Image (cartoon, rainbow, N blue to C red):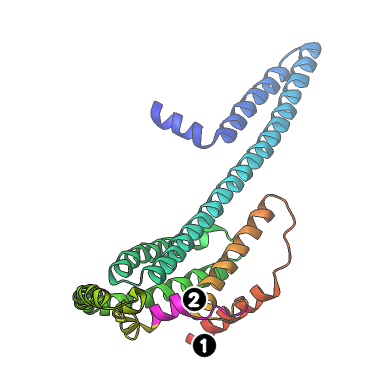
Amino acid sequence: MGTLSRRFTAARPLLVAAVIVALGAGGGFVVAASSEQKLREILQTASTALIFVALLGGVVKLLLDQVARGRERRDEQLRFITALLADLKSVYDRVERARILVKAHRSAKTYGNEMRDLIESAVQLRNVKRALDVTSGLAHLKDVFLCIQRMEKYLNDLIEEFTTFYKLIADKQKVSEAKFTAGAKVHEASSAAQAKEATTVPNAILPLPDDDAWDNILLSLPNLKEFCYGDPGQGYGGNDYQSRFVAALDLASWLLRNELQSIRGVRGSNMPKSLEQVRTSIREEKVSKK
């Protein structure tokens, strides 16, 4: 019984306090009814004061509790949105790093390593989507969700291409590297022999054999080719990477940052026209798929 009583008191503190005050005030009025005039007046005044003080204290406590709960919800919302922005930045940094390195290294090995990082980015976006449920309280929940969905779809297209062709591409790269190494040895021997016979050394040096393996590999990977070498164009109207991934990322980030400002009591800015066009495109894309 003691445990149940403590649980009930903790769950409904105001109700328990009201019952105690009511019993105390009621007892005061009962005693006053059978007391002398002077004592009756004192008891009635004290009981009435007890009721008003308790009522006022209860109202003040309710207001303070409500303010505290509101502050907790606000702080929790700020932490949630800040974490979402950090996740999106982490994904973008990883994707951009992969794009630069694959383009620079031009090798199947780097392609394989960086695509594994992109797989982790896609998983991270999936986790972000799961966190965006109706209880998150975001004002632009649907638009942010559609942005994350578009970003995930873009990465999934790259990943599907990777899982389909990577083994074949890695084998091609090995064959090409073996041919290039053999050609380089022949080139070195030929250059040395001709340099001895020639009167002018620079004219006797042969060019290295071409290593066109990566260009041939890209023929099998249209999504990767567009990802690394596609024309970014102006604004978000360039390649798929800009229009599908970067545009969706920028819109989601803008919406989340604007909501952060709103929660902090700062008036948000108007959405740029370029992002308005992106939002319209994403919404129309959703409608067309239904």
Query: Residue tagged by mark 2?
Result: 241
Q: Does residue 41 appear in this view?
A: yes
Does 228 lie within the magenta span?
yes
Instruction: State the extent of the magenta-drawn residues as a range.
Output: 223-234
Residue 143 percent coordinates (x, y): 57, 71
Q: Residue 99 versus residue 52: which sits nearer the camera?
A: 99
Question: Residue 174 lies in what quarter of the image?
Answer: bottom left
Q: Is residue 284 left or right of residue 165?
A: right
Numbered tag placed on residue 10 in the rendering: none
Instruction: Give left or right: position of 140 versus 36.
Output: left
| Nearer-the-camera pick, 127 or 157 | 157
In which quadrant of the rendered view does residue 107 lie? bottom left
Residue matched to label 1: 288
Q: Mark 1 or 2 closer to N-term?
A: 2
The quadrant of the rendering that contains the N terminus is top left
**Label 1 amino acid?**
Ser
Image height check: is 272 above or below 65? below
Q: Amino acid at mark 2?
A: Tyr
Residue at x 55%, y 78% (from the top left corner):
232
- 147 or 223, which lies in front? 223
Q: Residue at x 58, y 67 (%)?
A: 250
Dot 2 falls on a residue whose secondary structure is helix
Q: Is residue 215 magenta?
A: no
Residue 56 at x, y = what percent? 73, 32
Give the residue displayed 69% in from the left and 55% down from the top. Answer: 262
Q: In the structure shown, which secondary structural element does the residue marked by tag 1 occupy?
A: helix
